[in-house]
Image: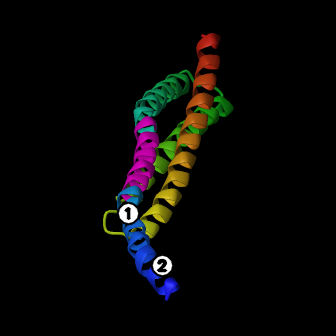
Amino acid sequence: MMMKHLILIVMPFLLLMGCNTGPAEATQQEELEANVMVIHDDAMAKMGDIYKLRRNFRSLRDTLAAQQADTATLQALQQQIDELNQADEVMMVWMRNYSAPDTLQHEQAMNYLQQELQKIERVQTIMDSTIEAARQTHQQYEQQK
């Protein structure tokens, strides 16, 4: 009899605690989505660097081609342009494929956002390393002038 009363007293508290996860789940999901967007925004800010470097390499390639530079130099410049194009495309592909998980249940949304976080981190790594390599290469050509 005592156990029956104890269950009747404890059960409402357990139910209330179980119902209280909604806001915490929503906050958790919002924070994860915000993390994804912060990395995306940071990567987007670097798109200008990619465009500028690509433009500089194209100009340099065209100038050296007009001066009949050696094929290896022209190929190296084209390789750098291709790598910048690839970094640009990786970002564009991620953006085309990403969609906010508004219609997913919490657990599905969290899994999706975790995957997207990993993807956008890879995009950022590719962009950062490509930009850094391009800057170093561009510096070398500028020093040769």
Quadrant position of residue 45: top left
Q: Is 118 rendered above or below residue 6?
A: above
**Residue at the spot 53% in from the left edge and 28% down from the top edge:** 61
Quadrant position of residue 144: top right
Disc 2, SS: helix
145 sits to left or right of 101:
right
Comparing 119 with 129, the one in front is: 119
Mark closest to the chain's N terminus, 1 or 2: 2
Q: Which residue is mark 1?
A: 20
Disc 1, SS: loop
Q: Is residue 80 visible?
A: no
The magenta region covers: 26-42
How far from the left and from the top, in percent, is residue 95? 39, 52
Magenta span: predominant SS is helix
Dot 2 alpha-carbon crowd within 10 angstroms: few under 14, some 14 to 19, many 20 or more: few
Query: Amino acid under label 2?
Result: Leu
**Residue at the spot 46% in from the left edge and 62% down from the top edge:** 110
The C terminus appears in which quarter of the rendering? Answer: top right
26 sits to left or right of 1:
left
Q: Which residue is mark 2?
A: 6
Q: Residue furthest front?
A: 1
